[in-house]
Image (tube, helix red, strand yellow):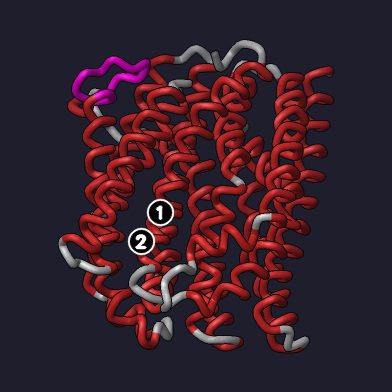
Amino acid sequence: MLLGDPKKAIVQLSIPMIIGMSVHTIYNLVDAIWVAGLGSDALAAVGFVFPLFFMLMGIATGLGTGGGAAISRMIGAKNKEGADSVAVHTIVIMLILVVVFTVPFFFFAEEIFTGMRAGSATEMSVAYARVIFAGTIFVFFSNIANALLRGEGDAKRAMQAMVLGTILNIVLDPIMIYTLEMGVAGAAWATVISLAVTSAVMMNWLIFRQDTYLSFNFSRFRFDKAIVKDILRVGLPASVMQLSMAFTMLIMNLIIVMVDTTDGVAVYTTGWRVVTIAILPLLGISTAVVSVSGAAFGAKSFEKLDVIHLYSIKIGLMIETTIAVATFIFAPQITAVFTQAEGTAHIAPDLIAFLRIITLFYPGLAFGMLSSSLFQGTGKGMNALIVTILRSLILTPIFAILFGFIFESGLPGLWWSLVIANLSGSIVAFLWARYYLGDLLKTASV
């Protein structure tokens, strides 16, 4: 699949991932709805924890992206032994990272959220976070195993694993939160248990049954600096990309609290869950672009890279424009889903405003996200990282401070800062990718 028609490969890999991610994101919405029943402090608590959870997810996703992209390049070069070695190295690196992050996050949770000015939501934040941090191993393995399956072109089973975990999570949420009266911590337990089951299923496929393209032999494992470098040259920038977005969320939470109240954090967090659904098609297409462009680059079929880039953006642009229009029109109805409870009804006007303003960057995001995926697939992870840092850690805080404090435009101004920063970053990424592809094609023609 990875070495055939690039347009066909993008579609075949994208559809299963979009389905899997759609189900997963539906869980995120359902989770928010159940948590909303506990009041705005509970929504704010999840909002304060989310950047840290996203940080863990980001590191795991980054490592998985690095391993998956390296595997795709090995497949393109027809190097089965190399692909197997990359897979084993990725798992070993993962185990080291799990230890590094689990201990400090778990034991210093209270100090972390006090420092984040969580206020009345501090106790709930700590209760939710400690369960999530205790399950770090499942957060990492589920993401990395999924990326390895995608790297070898097995998007179908990657989708099945995501769907299984999400359905289980949806079922467990009301049971843990309300039936067992565990409150917001129950939502965290539902997440960890579902990730554990998903991890067990994928471990069975990859390691015990070994009925995948990849083979794992840990008894013969020896660290190979060249392989570690190959994984990390994409994986490290990809992780830092995700971390930069997590830090952006932390910064935005702090700015929102200073401009408004913790209710503003509840609006931002809840609204961003809707954003994740809106950009799902782009996320699915981007995972396909990483794998397909990696295989094309490994086979030195540089002309295919140009096709992959423009075709994926064309699809993404059409889909996101449609979603943006629909979200803008139905923003009040979407908001009503999250504000039925008495404790959350007062944030409805602000949430409607968020949903309508933020739709303006959906179409433009296709240019940036899919350009970054092309960089990752071809091993140019630093290019994608630079663009992400520009957007997340430079432009977003600058515009947020400008609109929030200098122009004093309140929460709507903060939402506009997100739109302007994301569109600016997307333009830079697209132009850089076109320049990079032009150089590759010139080299190939010499």
Q: Along the horizontal axis of the image, is 233 left or right of 105?
A: right
Q: Is residue 140 magenta?
A: no
Magenta highlight: main SS? loop
Q: Nearer the viewer, residue 136 or 360?
A: 360
Q: Quadrant of the N terminus?
A: top right
Callout 1 crowding tier (Cα within 10 Å): few <14, some 14–19, many ≥20: some
**Which element carries disc 1, helix, strand or loop?**
helix
Q: Residue at x 62, y 24 (%)?
A: 10
Q: Along the horizontal axis of the image, is 404 left or right of 220?
A: right
Q: Along the horizontal axis of the image, is 146 left or right of 194?
A: right
Residue 43 image point, x, y percent = 41, 71
Please give the range of residues in magenta.
205-216
Q: Along the horizontal axis of the image, is 288 left or right of 64?
A: right
- Quarter of the image for residue 433 reads top right
Is residue 203 positioned above or below 49 on the image? above
- In the picture, the disc for residue 30 is 1
Q: Residue at x 38, y 41 (%)?
A: 143
Name the residue at the left extreme: 180
- In the picture, the disc for residue 34 is 2
Is residue 129 positioned above or below 142 on the image? below
Q: Residue at x 29, y 60 (%)?
A: 187
Q: Nearer the viewer, residue 412 or 304?
A: 412
